[in-house]
Image (spheres, rainbow, N blue to C red):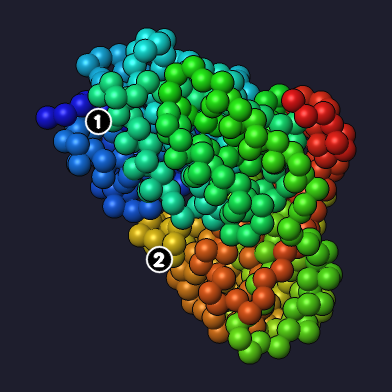
Amino acid sequence: MGFTILSAEISHETNTFNIRPTDLQAFRDRYLLDGPSAVGAKGHTNTELAGLLDVGRAHDWDVAHVISAAAGPGGRVTQAAFETLLAPLLEAAGRGGWDGVFLILHGAMVIEAHDDGEGEILRRLRAVVGPDLPVAVTLDPHANVTRAMCDLAQILVSFTTYPHVDIRATGRRTAELLHRTMAGDIHPRTYRAHRPMLEEANGGRTDIGPMIDRHAMARAFEARKGVYAISINAAFPCADIPELGPTVLVTGEGESADLRSIAEELADDIWDHRHEALNSYLTPQEAAEAARRWHPGGGCLIIADYADNPGSGAYGDATALLTALLDAGVKEACFGPLIDAEAAATLQDVPLGATVELSIGGKTAPEFGGGPLEVTGTVLWRGEGRVVGDGPILGGQERSFGKTAVLRVAGIDVLIVSIAHQMLDLQQFRAFGIDPEEKAVVALKSMQHFRAAFTPIAGRIIVCDTGALCTTQYDRLPYVHVTRPVFPLDMDGEAD
């Protein structure tokens, strides 16, 4: 038997502008699994845990995975939920006998008592296992990586793709570095460079734009002796915390000025390209007019409501785009998900094929993306919103929308759900009788992840900013705690 590894997953991306706290039920709604259940559910999918287990089998490790917990992006994690999720990790750590620890984190968790949720996890862990035990951490590239995180873990490695299609590969890569560290072959630490921006100009897109060359530079640097992993983090701008902003992490051998210079060079490139935005954000009316004029021949028109992305902690109930589509008379379309648990519950008792009048969406914060919309529609589907994905990101993984219904309103099939998820897999429509390939127009709530599954069926993709909670109109958001000056709130600010 090889090394003995303690592992845990505690993941959340916290939108501090969201007024709804993230409690334990929010984790149950996505997944809250004990170790054996997590291994059974996630051990062969595109997950960090699967990557860890791949390496564990190759090296004959004894892996003790104690918890997998993730909630959909939302408001600050309650202290009670945080303590409950952290307890299995600390209890197992206290038993001792570990050669290393592997943590699956997001990097943008904010809890009630701490702005740096991951830093607090690592502080609590170090208090139990001591300062020297090898600790490896996987991160989402939308992490707001803090100094404390780099001080408390020797190895931090982020996904290299957005949409995130290399999650399992990142787990493998990180676990291999942990193995080499435990074997004494390497003695890594992680250096951090940061720039005073709310986020990288294009949110970290890796399908086009400057991040392609940036990652090519990173891979070239990794060919140098003593450079083990370079992570480029675009940041998560919806967290109003002091250490907000894009970072470059270089995990390498011991003390090295060269590692610091690599991190700074890549961070400078992020700063130098701060004005080069790739997306053109249409208003809801402009997007609806494009939909009205669309004549599909080589695919559907995809309209992404960027600002109301549940995957970044928006409420997912903004109605501005749906209103504009209806006003423009758009037909042969679908729209989803619209998160409205009240409307979804009401529709559960309505016979299929019946016509109903009700209010949908816009109930949480009408000032962000539009208020409730009064509609008349036909019920096409209702029931429990279970989905098993088959796309590049969600393939083989199960998600639940909770109580779900499909309401056809004037030629638009509206997917109304109870539990917030962004749209990133075709099955999130197909499971409820909507085939997006048969639609002329597909309007969905997502920023970038949808591209992995929806690009192959698209004739054109456009992006809409409805003014919802994840708007790129940053001056509409009440930033208080972020360190100033910061770009673009203070225009050019000052680089470190």
Q: Position of residue 99 (x, y in %)?
A: 26, 21
In-front residue for pair 464/82:
464
Vertical order, 439 against 451 (above or below): below
* CB atoms of marks 1 and 2 within 8 Å: no
Q: Which residue is drawn at 51% across and 67% down?
A: 453
Residue 298 sits in quarter:
bottom right
How many C-alpha atoms fall within 10 Å of the one at disc 2: few (<14), some, or many (≥20)? some
Residue 249: x and y in percent read 55, 31
Q: Quadrant of the C terminus?
A: top right
**Image location (x, y in percent) of residue 262:** 58, 32
User: Could you say where residue 190 lies in the image, as x and y percent from the top left?
Assistant: 50, 25
Q: Which amino acid does label 2 sit on?
A: Asp
Q: Quadrant of the N terminus?
A: top left
Say which label, 1 or 2, has the lower sequence index. 1
The residue pinned by badge 2 equals 390
Query: What residue is shown at x 30% (from left), y 14% (from top)?
Result: 94
How far apart are labels 1 and 2 at the CA level? Answer: 29 Å
> Residue 63 sits in which quadrant?
top left
**Residue 198 location, quadrant:** top right
Q: Which amino acid does label 1 sit on?
A: Ala
Q: Which of 270 and 343 is in front in this view?
A: 270
Badge 1 element: strand
Residue beneath disc 1: 64
Residue in the foreground of this view, choosing between 48 and 211: 211
Which residue is found at the position 85% from the left and 43% from the top?
476
In this picture, residue 20 sits left or right of residue 5? right
